[in-house]
Image (tube, rainbow, N blue to C red):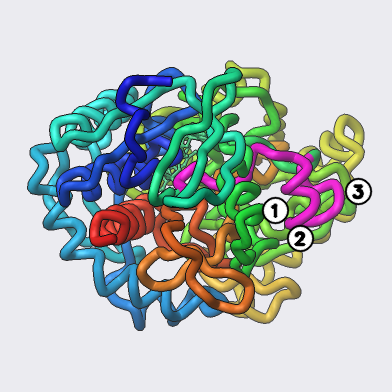
Amino acid sequence: MSENDSNPWDVIIVGAGFAGLTAGIAAAEAGARTLIVESEAVPGGGASISSGILWAPQSTADLTGYVTDGDPALQSAYCDNFFPALEWFMSHGLPLSQPAPLGDLGIGIVMEGGTAGKKHEFMALMAEAARRKGAEIRFNAPLQSAVRSEDGYLVNLGGGKMPVRTRAIVFAGGGFQANSELVDRYIGANAARAFYQRGMPANTGAGLQTALSLGAGESRNMNHVYGHSMPDAPLPPERLQPLTAYIALHSIAVNRAGKRFVNETEGKLEEVILEEAWKQDGGVFWLIFDDRTYRQFGIDTGISPALPKIDRLVEWRAVGAPVFEARSLEELAQQLHETEGVSYDALETINTFNAACHAGTAENLDPPRSINPDPVEHGPFYALRARGGLSATCGGIRVDDAMRVLDSAGNALPGLYAAGVDAGGVFGRYYGGWLGWALVSGWLAGQGTAAR
Ligand SMILES: Cc1cc2nc3c(=O)[nH]c(=O)nc-3n(C[C@H](O)[C@H](O)[C@H](O)COP(=O)(O)OP(=O)(O)OC[C@H]3O[C@@H](n4cnc5c(N)ncnc54)[C@H](O)[C@@H]3O)c2cc1C
């Protein structure tokens, strides 16, 4: 036990990722004795390997207009507090760009100007900002469990150490995307095996499980996920973001039966492909695109200048991802059939898609294609075998608009808060900015614990 543990902490924050560090800065700044515990040896969590684009929709109406299944109270808390939280955040001298419009996503700022590899440094600076305000950060200190005590909670950090006393806990452990048992339980049977892990291995849902053991309720949307299409090849964490198959937004996605199974452009960032991809045979699908699309979006994704301009076709091949190339669509369909076992019906699927794009009826296809009706007709033609890359779980601990943890009847549990991906229900089938949510929910949770 550390000397500092002899008196109860005002708050223990679980996780030194974006939400946890934000909560730590806010709580310590407001005068709370703050301990941040992190299971890994360094701070950062998912943000350290992210694109670093901290964004939020322009308004609550904008968010509720397309994330139709999210919790309206959380969505208002998010959008109404985004600019105040951002202003507060920017006052801490961190290297951030100025807020700017981000296409139809909303408004965004970029960490470290979006420079690849610099997000670790940014997260280290956030940790430093929390320490400057008086927070202590303890690494290699995983939350394992917690129980109620007379003056709050006893938190077990493993390693045979004495439990640590605290008046409040903020769960900011990044959700349960890396816990295959929980993914299978909440998302669907055998989902974990089908997904590609596009997130932090440490995010195993200890926050959710501990909160449930203390009486918390589950949020809505426990079965929804967020992520992107990934090449079906193993990648180290720092390559997950650059090698993401952002081209999915301009491709046709077909399953082993050679059929389209999803509107590839539903949602704002192709997140809906994931919702359907894990249900396909073997969890895999093939993204089919032509040379024109590859030249237009394979290097510069067109999504944000913060995404690196790299030749993804070259990079995918270099890591051994299954990429197929042919001079004609017939030849591509034959290759996929012979080497991947994809039904030759894929050819008819592509021809039907192309005809609808030319006729302006792509929206009437089944499944429809709502935007980017780009016919696949300029050879050479390509196919990438892909999987749904799971970055975050949309359901989690049930919270109110002040990030207080609620039981299943909607009553607040004393001294318990959640933030970031651990705080579930703001997003569902669609999504509106994880880093923006981590900022706002972390800020609210940190202030809430200090106000106690
Ligand atoms: C490749 C990639 C690119 C992305 N790009 C963007 C982007 O540009 N914009 C955007 O908005 N979002 C993006 N995201 C999503 C975003 O980065 C995350 O959703 C966000 O960082 C989540 O913040 P968090 O604090 O909730 O969780 P995390 O940042 O993951 O932090 C959770 C922390 O808790 C720790 N932890 C877990 N379990 C325990 C435990 N038992 N005890 C103690 N500590 C624990 C973890 O080690 C981690 O440090 C991206 C994600 C990925 C993977």
Q: Badge 2: how crowded within 10 Å, few (<14), some, or many (20+)?
A: many
| On screen, residue 65 above or below 98 | below
Q: CA distance from mark 3 to mark 2?
A: 12 Å
Dot 3 or dot 2: first in sequence order is 2
| On screen, residue 236 above or below 178 | above
Q: Quadrant of residue 17?
A: top left
Q: Which residues are magenta?
A: 171-192
Observer-nearest residue: 155 or 254?
Answer: 155
Q: Quadrant of the N terminus?
A: top left
Task: Give the residue displayed 73% in from the left and 59% down from the top.
Answer: 276
Say which mark, if any, is on residue 343.
3
Say which mark, if any, is on residue 37.
none
- Relative placement, left or right, of 202 versus 345 is left
In the rendered structure, which amino acid carries the disc numbered 1?
Ala
- Tags 2 and 1 touching, CB below 8 Å: yes
Q: Which residue is mark 1?
A: 253
> Is the CB of mark 1 within 8 Å of ligand 1?
no
Q: Residue 180: within the magenta?
A: yes
Q: Is residue 75 at all visible to an observer of this figure?
A: yes
Q: Secondary structure at mark 2?
A: loop
Say which mark, if any, is on residue 260.
2
Observer-nearest residue: 401 or 320?
Answer: 401
